[in-house]
Image (spheres, grey):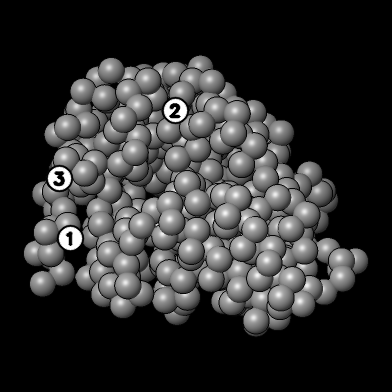
């Protein structure tokens, strides 16, 4: 998908010059990014973009590529939104509907601690109590007034059980995030796309009030004001255009410029789910995913932590490693990717070998990146005080055998 069909095609020499200027400056500006995106269907242009992105990554991040060993806890898969591509959200009467009790959270955490996991990923549907009386009744019976009340307690259980929570609970208010901050190392919200067009009738977010771009941008800004290490991301292939992708990346960059709190950006391709309205929509071609990862690196800059989930692109890991990413995200030895259950996690050994073949080195991190261990102002005091239990002298996972080579041996 071109960023703009009205732009003249670039020659390879012109593309290489734009890429080189962006790498030297630290990041691409809009005009250069639009020109490169308009010509990225040509293999030689893609290779130039990838080469520049990889050079930018090496300059700023070195040879390391990180991964977080985690457990994925889908606290509830009830959701008031009905995105046309989502297979995670269930209706209350579905046999697959599930809301975790605190005892169940504790059991997953204990299993995770036993196998060296540090991150407890809390992922759940948006405001299900607004849509479903049965969920309101369940919450009340447990002593909760809202899903956020339940989430706060689940994060407390995970933290006190020996893990660091990272919460992605959809759209939250500043007050909600303040309540979660004492138990979370980081939080996040996929921006997905800034296009209001996707909220129109027949589009992916028409029945999803919590996917309103202005509301999601506001949450990003409020997290910045609260000094919360924050994950954002772009979702590729849900009906957006090239210019809308660039708008989204530039909006994330602007938030980082203003607040300095965006700790990572995920570039995630859409995966079709057969039971959804978009079940027949083709996913992006592999080369297009790789090209947008590379362009994201050049637009966001070399200092940004850039992530591409390996289970969503298992056939192109080598290409992604040449496209400027420096992180694989969370990979669990215990739990599914409940958002994309059809896409199993790779083994850490496989990621280690693949990363090594690219001339880079796989390391294990916490739910926060090593550089954040120099920024105490971004953490609640009790979370900050706990970090030395999890981090080694490099700010990486104290539990990992990857750093010593034991696990890879």
| Residue that mark 2 sits on | 228
Location of residue 347 by image quarter:
bottom left
Q: Secondary structure at mark 2?
A: loop
Q: Mark 1 packing: few (<14 Cα in 10 Å), some, or many (20+)?
A: some
Q: Secondary structure at mark 1?
A: loop
For the question of whether residue 97 can be seen, the reply is: no
| Residue that mark 3 sits on | 398
Cα separation between marks 2 and 3: 23 Å
Cα separation between marks 2 and 1: 28 Å
Q: Residue furthest right?
A: 6
Circles 2, 1 touching at the beta carbon (< 8 Å): no
Q: Could you tell me which quadrant the N terminus lies in? A: bottom right
- Mark found first going from the N terminus, 2 or 1: 2
Work out whether 5 lies above or below 22. below
Q: Residue at x 53, y 71 (%)?
A: 51
Q: Could you tell me which quadrant the C terminus lies in? A: bottom left
In the rendered image, residue 360, in percent from the top left (x then y), is placed at 32, 67
- Mark found first going from the N terminus, 2 or 3: 2
Q: Residue at x 69, y 63 (%)?
A: 18
Q: How many marks?
A: 3
In the rendered image, residue 273, in percent from the top left (x then y), is placed at 56, 67
* Label annotation for residue 393: none
| Residue that mark 1 sits on | 402
Location of residue 284 by image quarter:
bottom right
For the question of whether residue 325 can be seen, the reply is: yes
In the rendered image, residue 243, in percent from the top left (x then y), is placed at 77, 56
Q: Residue at x 21, y 23 (%)?
A: 385
Q: Residue at x 60, y 28 (%)?
A: 258
Q: Secondary structure at mark 3?
A: loop
């Amino acid at each position: 998908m071109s960023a703009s069909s009205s732009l003249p095609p670039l020659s390879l020499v012109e593309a290489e010059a734009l890429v080189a200027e962006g790498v030297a400056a630290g990041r691409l500006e809009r005009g250069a990014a639009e020109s490169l995106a308009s010509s990225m269907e040509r293999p030689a242009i893609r290779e130039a973009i990838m080469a520049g992105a990889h050079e930018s990554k090496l300059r700023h991040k070195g040879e390391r590529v990180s991964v977080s060993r985690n457990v994925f806890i889908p606290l509830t898969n009830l959701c008031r939104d009905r995105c046309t591509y989502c297979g995670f959200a269930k209706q209350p009467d579905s046999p697959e509907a599930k809301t975790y009790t605190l005892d169940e959270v504790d059991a997953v955490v204990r299993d995770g601690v036993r196998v060296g996991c540090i991150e407890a990923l809390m992922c759940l549907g948006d405001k299900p109590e607004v849509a479903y009386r049965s969920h309101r009744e369940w919450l009340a019976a447990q002593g909760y007034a809202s899903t956020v009340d339940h989430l706060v307690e689940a994060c407390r259980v995970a933290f006190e059980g020996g893990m660091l929570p990272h919460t992605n609970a959809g759209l939250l208010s500043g007050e909600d995030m303040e309540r979660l901050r004492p138990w979370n190392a980081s939080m996040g919200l996929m921006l997905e796309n800034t296009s209001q067009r996707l909220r129109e009738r027949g589009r992916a977010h028409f029945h999803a009030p919590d996917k309103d771009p202005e509301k999601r941008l506001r949450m990003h800004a409020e997290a910045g004001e609260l000094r919360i290490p924050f994950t954002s991301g772009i979702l590729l292939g849900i009906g957006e255009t090239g210019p809308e992708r660039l708008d989204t990346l530039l909006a994330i960059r602007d938030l980082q410029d203003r607040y300095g709190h965006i700790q990572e950006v995920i570039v995630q391709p859409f995966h079709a789910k057969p039971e959804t309205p978009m079940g027949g929509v083709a996913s992006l071609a592999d080369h297009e995913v790789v090209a947008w990862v590379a362009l994201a690196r050049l637009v966001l800059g070399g200092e940004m932590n850039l992530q591409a989930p390996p289970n969503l692109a298992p056939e192109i890991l080598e290409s992604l490693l040449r496209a400027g990413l420096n992180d694989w995200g969370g990979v669990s030895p215990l739990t599914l990717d409940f958002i994309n259950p059809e896409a199993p996690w790779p083994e850490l050994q496989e990621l280690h070998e693949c990363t090594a073949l690219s001339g880079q080195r796989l390391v294990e991190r916490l739910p926060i990146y090593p550089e954040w261990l120099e920024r105490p102002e971004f953490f609640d005091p009790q979370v900050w005080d706990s970090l030395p239990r999890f981090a080694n002298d490099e700010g990486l996972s104290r539990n990992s055998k990857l750093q010593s080579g034991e696990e890879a041996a």
